[in-house]
Image (tube, helix red, strand yellow):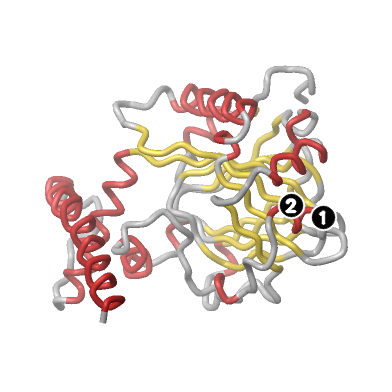
Amino acid sequence: MIAAYDVPRLVVDSANFDRSFDQRPFGYEHNLSGLDLFSEPSLRALAARYDRDFMVAASAPTPATKFYSVPYGSHTPLEAFDRLDSGNQRILLKMPENHDRRYRDLLHTLFEQVVALRGGLRGERVERLASSILISSAEAITPFHFDPEISFFFQISGEKVYHLYAPSVLSEAELERFYVMGIVNIGQVELAGRDPKSEYVFRLVDGKGMHQPQNCPHWVETRANRSVSYVFSFETETTRSLGRTRAFNHYMRRCRLTPAPLGARPGLDRAKSWAMRVAIPLRKSIGRGIGALRSRR
């Protein structure tokens, strides 16, 4: 067990970390639950500071519900916070480190520990590092989706059940359709047809955590009490490059060509990635230009 008064940290079996990092989910312990920055007054004060970079949504009726079909945007984070016990709310506060230095210190402390467990960055450049706080009413469901980033999840209070599948259950075509957009957002995929034998189930309570690999599809449910969770996520140049390669492969399939399997020809993968480094921003720019022209008609 980790003492609550220790420096914030996670404890994980190093051999399991080496085997599973960014390949398969695995659990660990942590000592974040007793920190004052996760007390109810601190979280309420944090919620009051948000006027952007948040999402407030109702619970989904089922895990298979389309992610953005659930009602959202009806309340501010503070309004939703005050309705947690009377309504069915899910609050996502993005990048709390931009609002309170304590969250920035926590983010960098934990990330340094993960980098040390990995044996350094191994020449990779970190493109994005950010955290989020998730606050949910009791018996709330977050529907099935995947995230295009590597994440470490910490349950602070309440009970949350995570249902995950290894990234390998997603087809390349499913991933390519998402990465062609060149965005950091959730990836909508279907739950139906996934092999139950490939499911990992983590029952998380305070002091428990879980590693979620990039592109790891999952759905989440809270139990009898409200839930508070903390997660930090990161992308490296390598993970973003893989996304751009998948975007290139998407266009190949549209031209009725069969791309080489990802990783089979590393030099070709790099060439595809560099091509999309130019094409994706250009595509976005053209899209904005067309939108502006249409608005003037």
Q: Quadrant of residue 55?
A: bottom right
Q: Is residue 57 left or right of residue 165?
A: right
Residue at the extreme bottom of the image, as rendered: 297
Instruction: Give the left or right position of residue 192, taking residue 214 as reference.
Output: right
In the depicted structure, whether residue 11 falls above or below residue 5:
below
Q: Is residue 45 above or below residue 111?
A: below
* Point 79% across, 23% down: residue: 4
Tag of residue 82 = 1
Label 2: state its secondary structure: helix
Task: Tell me if label 2 and label 1 are in contact, CB under 8 Å.
Answer: yes
Name the outermost residue toward the front: 296
Question: Which quarter of the image is occupied by the C terminus?
Answer: bottom left
Q: Residue furthest top?
A: 6
Q: Quadrant of residue 157?
A: top right
Residue in the image at 65% along x and 41% along y? 230
User: Seen in the image, is 158 located left or right of residue 56?
Assistant: right
| Front residue of this view, candidates 231 and 133 | 133
Say which quadrant the N terminus sits in. top right
- Amino acid under label 1? Asp
The percent position of residue 133, horizontal first and vertical second, equals 65, 45
**Which residue is drawn at the image coordinates 37% and 69% (left, top)?**
174
Other-residue count near label 2 (Cα within 10 Å), few / some / many at <14 / 14–19 / ≥20: some
Spot occupied by residue 206 in the image (x, y as percentages of width and height): 78, 40
Residue 249: x and y in percent read 21, 64
**Nearer to me, 264 or 71:** 71
- Residue 127 at x, y percent in the picture: 35, 37
Element carrying mark 1: loop
Which residue is labeled 2 in the image? Answer: 78
Q: With respect to residue 97, does 188 lie above or below?
A: below
The answer for how far apart the CA atoms under marks 2 and 1 are is 6 Å
Q: Amino acid at mark 2?
A: Leu
